[in-house]
């Protein structure tokens, strides 16, 4: 393998600057403390390799014992586990079965069958850990809030000297966190820059295979525990475990693109009559000559309608898409109900982490917009709502312009709606 140049975070995707042991912010844990340099030079542009100073830097998120617990004790079902052999996905019927008495399901993961497949060289892919494993749920929620884009998290566990998937690209950005063992990575520049969700790598399979086989890799290195790597969507990559069981966590970032704004813009001009008009009876839609005059009319109508679309209309559609793509901090239903029932002056609450929301203030009402509903409240609650939604800890009795009794009513309502959660340790 070619030697890696040393340098700071400014090196072309090959920074070997040591990461501080435990940076506090979720993004800083992945890219180093200079988050601004990452945002300006790497985000959506080029890969970044960061060598970890602490091999246990990501053990709090997941380790091999946690992998075994997920596979053996958590009752996983498909599609929360995928199994791959030499680049091909194994039929889930070979590692799932009935759940037994009291669990009338037919696709629960069979740990004994998974063990046999793993011993035979298969890679295990634990999918959607941002839904099933508490440390990654919390980390993903915080990271998504910092990035402004939804995230997902999968873990790839590979037997010694095995490769799970052939060279490919993803249609989302990824952060790779090496958890255990060592893995050899080869990363090549894109054959299709900035692919959209409906432009997967197998649409360009021949070009991908040729680039991976004959191109000069941008990164050709071994990741060890504590190392991290960022790959923008479209960058080709393949990895092979070395010497022992290897596990890495892939955090996928489902980036919002300018094309998404275009989609929202087009959807916003649906009120234009000329764009809703039916095509003629008997038209051959496969004939360019017959389509041409109608396409010209569409272009004219778009040119007329698009300049009048307000940013708020586009933002409303984008907001619905982004807000529904992720989930905020989990709520503990029993504890939350008990807390609300016993709520009293002096108790502390905070906004639920990662909760998408927007407060619309009016003369008669304040409307709290959430991903799936709107909460209408008296305008008199607006100052208190500003405090409660700011993100810090707020105490009953200290909210502005409401009596203590009204503060209790408001906070109980927002606890029941999943907007607030108890603030512990304050």
Image (cartoon, rainbow, N blue to C red):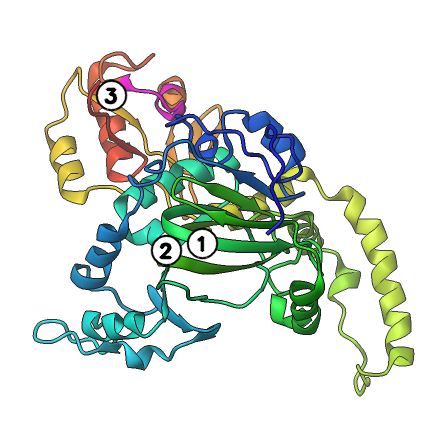
Residue position for label 3: 406
Mark 2 Cα-neighbour bin, 10 Å: few <14, some 14–19, many ≥20: many
Task: Let me know if residue 229 appears in the view.
Answer: yes
Tell me the number on the disc at residue 169.
Answer: none
Residue drawn at point x = 41 percent, y = 31 percent: 53
Give the x, y percent position of residue 191.
71, 61
Does 222 appear above or below 294? above
The nearer-to-camera label among 1 and 3 is: 1
Mark 1 Cα-neighbour bin, 10 Å: few <14, some 14–19, many ≥20: many
The CA distance from mark 1 to mark 3 is 58 Å
Give the x, y percent position of residue 49.
55, 40
Residue position for label 1: 183
Q: For the residue labelled by badge 2, is the local secondary structure a helix, a strand or a loop?
A: strand
Cβ atoms at labels 1 and 3 below 8 Å apart: no
Cβ atoms at labels 2 and 3 below 8 Å apart: no
Residue position for label 2: 246
The CA distance from mark 2 to mark 3 is 56 Å
Cβ atoms at labels 2 and 1 below 8 Å apart: yes
Query: Quarter-wise, where is residue 57 in the image?
Result: top left
Q: Nearer the viewer, residue 121 or 351?
A: 121
Q: Which residues are magenta?
A: 387-394
């Amino acid at each position: 393998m070619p030697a890696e140049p040393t340098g700071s975070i400014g090196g072309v995707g090959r920074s070997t600057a040591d990461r501080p042991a435990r940076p506090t912010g979720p993004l800083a844990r992945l890219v180093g403390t200079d988050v601004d340099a990452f945002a300006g030079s790497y985000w959506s542009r080029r890969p970044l390799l960061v060598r970890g100073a602490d091999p246990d830097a990501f053990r709090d998120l997941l380790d091999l014992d946690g992998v075994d617990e997920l596979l053996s004790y958590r009752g996983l079902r498909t599609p929360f586990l995928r199994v791959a052999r030499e680049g091909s996905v194994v039929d889930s019927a070979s590692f799932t079965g009935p759940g037994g008495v009291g669990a009338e399901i037919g696709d629960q993961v069979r740990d004994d069958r998974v063990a046999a497949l793993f011993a035979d060289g298969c890679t295990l892919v634990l999918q959607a850990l941002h839904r099933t494993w508490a440390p990654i749920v919390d980390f993903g929620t915080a990271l998504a809030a910092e990035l402004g884009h939804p995230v997902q998290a999968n873990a790839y566990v590979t037997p010694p000297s095995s490769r799970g998937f052939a060279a490919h690209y993803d249609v989302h950005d990824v952060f790779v966190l090496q958890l255990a063992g060592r893995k050899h990575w080869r990363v090549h520049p894109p054959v299709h820059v900035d692919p959209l969700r409906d432009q997967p790598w197998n649409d360009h399979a021949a070009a991908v295979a040729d680039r991976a086989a004959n191109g000069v890799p941008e990164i050709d290195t071994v990741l060890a525990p504590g190392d991290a790597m960022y790959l923008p969507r479209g960058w080709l990559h393949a990895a092979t475990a070395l010497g022992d069981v290897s596990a890495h966590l892939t955090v996928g970032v489902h980036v919002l693109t300018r094309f998404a704004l275009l989609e929202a813009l087009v959807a916003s001009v649906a009120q234009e009559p000329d764009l809703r008009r039916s095509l003629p009876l008997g038209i051959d839609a496969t004939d360019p000559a017959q389509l041409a005059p109608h396409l010209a009319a569409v272009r004219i109508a778009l040119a007329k309608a698009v300049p009048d679309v307000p940013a708020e209309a586009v933002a409303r559609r984008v907001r619905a898409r982004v807000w529904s793509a992720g989930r905020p901090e989990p709520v503990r239903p029993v504890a939350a109900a008990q807390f609300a029932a016993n709520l009293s002056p002096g108790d502390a609450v905070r906004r639920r982490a990662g909760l998408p929301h927007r407060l619309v203030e009016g003369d008669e009402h304040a409307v709290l917009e959430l991903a799936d509903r709107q909460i209408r409240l008296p305008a008199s609650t607006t100052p208190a709502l500003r405090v409660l939604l700011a993100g810090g800890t707020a105490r009953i009795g200290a909210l502005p312009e409401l009596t203590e009794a009204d503060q209790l009513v408001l906070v109980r309502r927002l606890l029941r709606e999943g907007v607030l959660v108890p603030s512990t340790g304050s």
